[in-house]
Amino acid sequence: MTYRLITYLLLAGFSQSVFAVGLSFSETQHLLTRTGFTPSFFEVTAIQGQKKTDAVQAILDSAQHPDGLQADGAFTEITKPLGRSATQSERDMYRQMQRESVLAMQQWWLGQMLTTQTPFAEQLTLFWHNHFVSSIQKVKYPALMYQQNQLYRSQALGNYRQLVHDMAKSPAMILYLDNQTNKKGQPNENFARELFELFTLGEGHYTESDVKAAARAFTGWQLDRNSGAFSFNKRQHDSGLKTLFGQTGNFDGEAVIDLIFTEKPEQVAVHLVSKWWLYFISTEPDVDEVNRLAQIFINADFELRPLMEALLLSPHFWSSNQPLLVKSPVDLVVGTQRIFGLNITDKGLLRQMGGPLEQQLFSPPNVKGWPGGNAWISSTTLLARAQLMGQTTRAIAGMAGASQQPMDSLYSSILAHPLAEWRGLLLPHGGIVAEVDAGTQPFLASDYPNAISALIEDPLYQLK
Amino acid sequence: MRAMNRRHFIQASGLLMASSMLPFSVSAAMNSNPNRTLVLVEFNGGNDSLNMVIPFTDQQYYTLRPSLHIPRNEQIPYTSTLALHPSLRPLVDHIDGGDMGTILGLGYPDPNRSHFRSIEIWDTASRSDETLDSGWLAQPRSDQFLADAIVIGRNFAPVSGNQTRTIVMDNADSFYQKSRNIDRVDNQSQNNVMAHLLKTQNDTKQAAELIKARLSLEKSKLPTFGGGVFGQQLREVARLILIGNTAPVIKVSLGSFDTHQGQKGAQAALFTQFAEGMASFHHVLQSAGYWDDVLVMTYSEFGRRVAENGSGGTDHGTAASHFVFGGGVKGGVYGKQPSLSDLSDGDLKFTTDFRQYYQTVQSGFLDDQSVPLYKPLGFL
């Protein structure tokens, strides 16, 4: 197995000073869990002992060179809409095809996360999917959701201003927030409002008249339904004078986005830094540190990599010996499988993710995305999570049990580490139920999967 | 109809006391009547109530909505100035007019047009310029209930609080089945993430143990409640009420009403689900003798812009009308329809503070004995 991330780490390792204090096992576990998914022993040991700054640089490099930029499948190709003359059976077939495409696309992304060598890129893609939200429920065309997903993956740590420009023109967004029908003389405010409220400034940093003016500026931004590409419809564009943030001009959509960044850089920076904090650090942002990071972001002209570097090197990122975040359903599904080399992406699992676990890929609940944080845990999702962990541990035990050969990879990889090490990997902050005495081993190798299941089924495995 | 204790209200203005008073959620403990259930119906996404309760005599309605107005011949007659959306037919056909109230022009000063901020204002009964942490129904209640509140579906913000035992479930059977996978935990934590996880786990286990004892009592087969998820949710609410002592507050939601485009068909389909579900709900509870102890109330983050947009839809607006149902409701119309001519930036000016709506429920249905902060509206 060649791990691209690990290649970067090994390269970075050459510059390691002999005097530097390297990352401990638990620090490495923390860094990899927060920037990707729960790591395997293999991933941890590849990085453990590296200088913190080197490890962070390597992880940033990996996100800028993601794998998974090509996918195969019908979902990557634009399907022409049915004409008005289509018969009922043609419509039924078309809908069936769309349903299959959506499922294939969800399976592709889940599989990509399960096998990727650049997990940070996937975690960032998931972040952007939840920040610049679109949903297949409304967009309908899988290829447009796929395109948007690739935009987020390829630009995951690019320039934020550019990402906003590209996102605004992404056909999925044009359909999702109704810019398709935003026309001269009859503006539709949906996109303009969320551009300010959710995508850049945050609520309270713009006025109702800013929303109305911006809606006019984005009139005529459409997609060509046949080619599936962005197209500017000049006849539907309102080129009249608009006043935004106290400035007057005949602004178009691009000018509006630029104005946001030139007129309100602090608000833009604080908004994104706060969201990253909630995603990567804890549920309680520290105001002074948020402001410090925001200033770094502004000074870097909204380049995302320097901001992420500062965030990952912030003392706040490393400060706690307690779990401060709830794992998302994706974290649980992907992280647990990756540790044991499982690759389950079946329909049943996806149905579970979209139903009781409440995180269906390509289908966030609304334009604000999944609320995340403590809201991941309610009585209903808690029960769904317990059920998922039960299924996963049965899958692990089943695979381990089915393989009577002692050198079978899963079985031997489980046996290769004492339970105390497994506890350090799976419950780095300790557990509530699962008590494993360091040094105490099960008498029989076949008891091992059960002991490990107890760690995964501990309530604190839900946190990170 | 159920006779209600009328309380004497002194002031005529909406606001009885300074708005710096305590929010609803920390008002005095309540002695909820164990038989009563408040059912919240959230119209998720911002319902266009002008096409729900139609000011049909106002020419402006037709002028500002050239393609989106409900034609006269399709409207259901309601009062001399108001008509109802045609898809609400099952409501008027099956529920006694005396058990249905309409409250007009609900809103709040300095309205916010963000979905997320505005629903937070409604969920916490806050002012537009303050942020509160707990839901307006977050009071812990008696231990005789298996939870303080049950949410079927999502968004438990109106019943969310540090001390509140809030249970989210899809249905009681699978809730109990799945609860067998978890155990009570004794640990405590100061860390908010761990504390939330542990509290949720314990509340869930406790509720599941209580519901187990009662599920065996409930064998009755209920009819289906119309099509769609909403009907299933409302059916589960009916079942929980028939089981008895489950929770004093149960919430469901219906949506999305965020009809920026293609509103006509989308809203009609949602109203059909709502009205069919409500008609079945009424029928089941009426037959079982529970209707007098139930109050159903609708709410939404905002209404929508008076004028239609160019997409066959409406953008985010402000004030909206809402419905209440129940055997204890004094049927009729409350509040005043906002003018369609005297608009604020294209939006309605609210005529009744939504906290008066809440106060009416707190004082008149949940038996909150504390001095009201807002003047109740009289529908109970």
Image (tube, coloured by chain):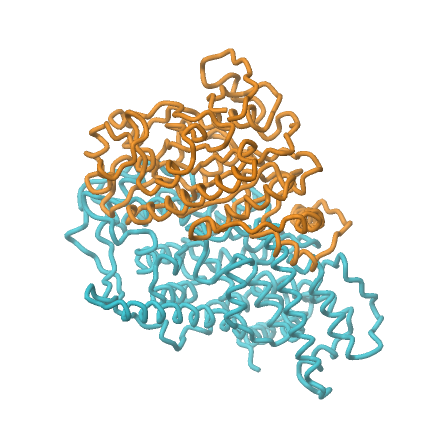
| Residue A34 x %, y % | 59, 60
Side of B361 where A236 appears, left or right: left
Chain shown cyan: that is A
Chain shown orange: that is B
Residue at image point 65% right, 58% down: B178
| Residue B90 x %, y % | 38, 41
Where on the picture, by quarter, is residue B12? Answer: top left
The number of discs equals 0
| Residue A130 x %, y % | 46, 56
Side of A1 where A103 appears, left or right: left
Q: Which of B269 and A332 is in front in this view?
A: B269
Residue at image point 25% right, 69% down: A80
**Do we see residue B241 in this rendering?**
yes
Side of B144 where B320 appears, left or right: left
Residue at image point 62% right, 70% down: A16
Q: List the single residue furthest toward the front.
A: B287
Residue at image point 75% right, 59% down: A430
Where on the picture, by quarter, is residue A458? Answer: bottom right
Q: Is residue A173 above or below residue A294?
A: below
Q: Which of A179 and B286 is in front in this view?
A: B286
Where on the picture, by quarter, is residue A408? Answer: bottom right
Q: Nearer the viewer, residue A368 or B280?
A: B280
Q: Is residue B315 above or below residue B128?
A: below
